[in-house]
Amino acid sequence: MSAEGDRPVVGGSHPGPASVRLSAELIEAIVDHARAGDPNEACGLVIGDRPAADGGAALRFERTRNKAASPYRYEIDPDDLLRLTIATDDADEVFWAIVHSHVRSPAYPSPTDLALAFYPDAIYLLVSLAADEPALGAFRIVDGTIHPVELMVAAPE
């Protein structure tokens, strides 16, 4: 644990990418979905052309339902997960980022988030609604270790 008490130590060499770019439209869609889910955590997936770990690019955000319907945890609805797994496989796409919101805590992975980090090649994108303005955080979670990823807004094309 870190000096902050409940935050796991970030360590080891960074598995990459150290930074990612998302469009303002994609970020807006993610924040809108998080706000719509409040007071419960919201969740979804960013679909990409290749895994984030391999330098892939984000293509679009797909909203999913939170089966847990809880302000403290999320579980992507199994029907949504199956539908999107088949669709991405058929389109030769991948789950580029796993997205969820924290309604009362920072945009930083919780111990529960660490335990449920089943996609080591993906980015974990968190949206915090704890303050007046939403905050976003991006991370790779590999073997229980949190690696911060700088999140940049891509310039409009």
Image: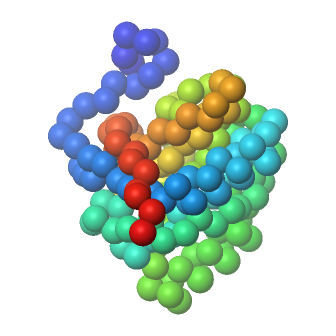
Residue 130 visible to the viewer? no
Residue 155 visible to the viewer? yes
Q: Quadrant of residue 9?
A: top left
At 45% from the left and 63% from the top, the residue drawn is 156
Q: How is the image coloured?
A: rainbow
Residue 141, percent from left and from top: 39, 45
Q: How many marks?
A: 0
Residue 77, percent from left and from top: 73, 61
Please identify the quadrant where the C terminus is shown: bottom left
Quick one: 42 or 141, which is closer to the camera?
Answer: 42
At 76% from the left and 35% from the top, the residue drawn is 71
At 28% from the left and 65% from the top, the residue drawn is 55
Residue 73, percent from left and from top: 69, 39
At 57% from the left and 76% from the top, the residue drawn is 85
Q: Is residue 126 left or right of residue 131?
A: left
Quick one: 27 or 99, which is closer to the camera?
Answer: 27
Residue 140, percent from left and from top: 37, 47
Q: Is residue 95 above or below residue 73?
A: below
Q: Is residue 48 left or right of residue 39?
A: left
Quick one: 63 or 66, which is closer to the camera?
Answer: 63
Q: Is residue 54 above or below residue 126?
A: below
Q: Is residue 94 above or below residue 108?
A: below
Residue at the far bottom: name it: 90
Q: Quadrant of residue 150?
A: top left
Q: Is residue 67 left or right of residue 19?
A: right
Please identify the quadrant where the N terminus is shown: top left
Quick one: 91 or 133, which is closer to the camera?
Answer: 133
